[in-house]
Image (cartoon, rainbow, N blue to C red):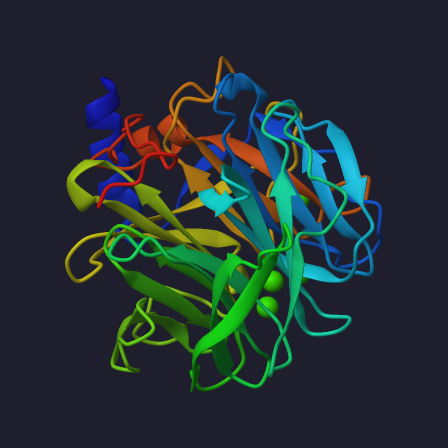
Amino acid sequence: MRPLACALLALALTGRDDPVTVQATVETDPVPSAGDAADDPAIWINPDDPSQSRIIGTDKAGGGLAVYAMDGRQIQYIACGKMNNVDLRYGFPLGGLKADIVVSGDRRDDTLRVLLVDQETGRLKEAPAGAIRLGIRVYGSCMYRSARTGKYYGVATSPDGELEQWELFEDGRGGVGGRLARKFRVGGTAEGCAADDELGHLYVAEERFGIWKYGAEPDAGTERTLVDRAGPGGRLTGDVEGLAIYCATNGTGYLLASSQGSSSFAVYRREGGNEYVMSFRIGPGRGIDAVTDCDGIDVVGAALGDRFPRGLFVAQDGRNEGGNQNFKFVRWDEIAAAAAPPLAVDTGWNPRRPRR
Ligand code: CA
Ligand code: CA
Ligand code: CA
Ligand code: CA
């Protein structure tokens, strides 16, 4: 049978909402800490050699941040705290240069820690660039760069259902400072979040309830829409965990969510009303165990060398066979091809040259 016919038959047999299965092609070294330790990844794109891009992963059990090469090898570990979620942005103005800036929430002392990536080596600079003391207990965190104003923000969520958004700025002493831009209540425990810089949306996962969509600008207010819910009437099974945005051209692409209770990932349209598209699972294969009980995720569409020439999806694995938790890497084009109809594959989006 031809691939399209196969896909259509599979769709007819399984129904629209049943997840398709893909396989990872790379898994990282396990994190140093045992138990529920790894949580959230962020993909850093190397400006000169995309095959030397990096995955930064959190070790929340009292460890810190690990940096992995594209073959999954750990090349750096900074024991900097109970880092739960991690996100990054490019081009932050610092000392007359454009810095690649990483923000990670530290549950030891409820701060957003700011670090920088060395653009030559793809390693995190050991000296912290800043620490922002929050007014809430930190759980999840993410970043937003406004296409309207060019300002950068760190966003923190809390186990108490609160959210704080902090504007980040050069502090005049070579570091990064923060000022509170807004604070509001989401509801129940909120962790995962992700901002769409280009379209100005802030997505927040209320773990037991669903995905909320807010305006990402600090003056956007608290008006929100529910993208999807966990449990009856929704496609998600709590906890709703990590969120990530796949950017294609003209403001199109996808919003992805980790549906932890079903060990699957839901895909929605990035544009318009975030229509549900499909769900997928990462099954065992190629000598790599399945992803189950996933926390955080990240995705980019850019070409990242021979291993990931048409985009990369990274997922934390809650139960890594034979070791501590780790992260699994999946080719985006394989996820796209598993969907019926296939998802878009667009390597043209460059986060270093954001559109206005
Ligand atoms: Ca977990
Ligand atoms: Ca959680
Ligand atoms: Ca988590
Ligand atoms: Ca596993």
- Residue drawn at (24%, 33%), measured in percent from left and top? 344
Position of 7 relative to 16 (above/below): above
Residue 289 visible in the shown view = yes
Of 145 and 320, the residue lying toward us: 145
How many numbered discs sit on the rendered protein? 0
User: Residue 229: in sight, yes or no?
Assistant: no
Instruction: Estimate the x, y position of residue 98 in percent, counting from the top left.
Output: 48, 38
Q: Image quadrant of residue 119?
A: top right
- Using residue 139 as the reference point, say whether residue 20 is left or right of it: left
Place of residue 118 in the rendered image (x, y in percent of width and height, measured from the top left): 63, 32
- Spot occupied by residue 31 in the image (x, y as percentages of width and height): 78, 44
The quarter of the rendered structure image containing the N terminus is top left
Front position in the image: 95 or 168: 95
Instruction: Please give the name of the residue rendered at 49% of the width and 30% of the height, measured from the top-left corner.
Output: 45
Quarter of the displayed picture in which ligand 2 can be seen: bottom right
Q: Position of residue 91 (x, y in %)?
A: 44, 40
> Residue at the location (73% across, 27% down)?
73
Q: Residue at x 50, y 83 (%)?
A: 162
- For this view, does 242 lie left or right of residue 62? left
